[in-house]
Image: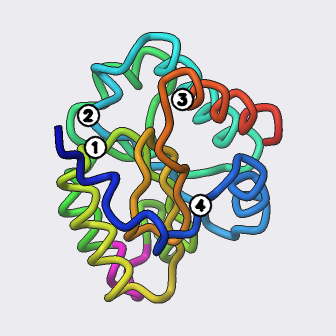
Amino acid sequence: MWNPAYVTPEIANIASPKIVAMAVKKAKRPMFVLGSLLNSLPEEITMEILEVAKLLKNKYNVTIVSTGGSYLTLSKYLEPDAKIGIIDLINNLRNPYWEGFDGKGNYDLILFVGVPYYIATQGLSTLKHFAPHLRTITLCKFMHPNADYSFPNLSNEDWLSYLRNLKSLI
């Protein structure tokens, strides 16, 4: 079966959990966007993602954003800072004058996980071309060539290992 995530992987910067942790620590205004696939992932992976989200929120005050129905799962463990459709969020992020959800200015690092690939690739392409003021990282199972950094294509076991490693580095 053809999978768009396997197309031209050599043009993206592959991120290790260590690189992601370093990027978050360096960011001034990071955001973590969780998409609707959070509702359909294996429970063990979902729980690791939610634990990463909690750590990011508590340790680095990362803005947690729920999109595409992820609120159903996310709200059981952590109240997001915002609920918004992914297209509206992308449109806000590409505006360098957007004041953010808290009125303190735009964000400089956006982490994504769980946004369906066909939507994520278009949103990441938009940000790549029209939002030079921010960096994007995907923590998804499949590599996203339009992100600044992305996990490589991973099996569920390897993905779980990457998420656990990231959690230990945060």
Check residue 82 in the rendering and tell me which mark sits there, or answer none. none
Which residue matches tag 2?
36
Mark 1, Cα crowd under 10 Å, few <14 / some 14-19 / many 20+, is: many
Query: Counting residues from the N terminus, which is met first, the one under dot 4 or under dot 2?
Result: 4
Can you tell which mark lies on residue 14? 4
Dividing the picture into quarters, in which one does residue 96 lie? bottom left
Q: CA distance from mark 3 to mark 2?
A: 13 Å
Number of labelled discs?
4
- Mark closer to the chain start, 3 or 2: 2
Q: Position of residue 66 (x, y in %)?
A: 35, 41
In the rendered structure, the answer to whether residue 165 lies left or right of residue 85 reads right
- What stretch of residues is rendered in magenta? 93-99
| Distance between the alpha carbons at the discs numbered 2 and 1 | 7 Å
Residue found at the far right of this picture? 169
What residue is rendered at 40% in x and 45% in y?
142
As helix, strand or loop, the secondary structure at mark 2 comes to helix
Quarter of the image with the N terminus is top left
Real-space Cα separation, disc 4 to disc 1, in angstroms: 25 Å
Residue visible at 40% across and 87% down? 97
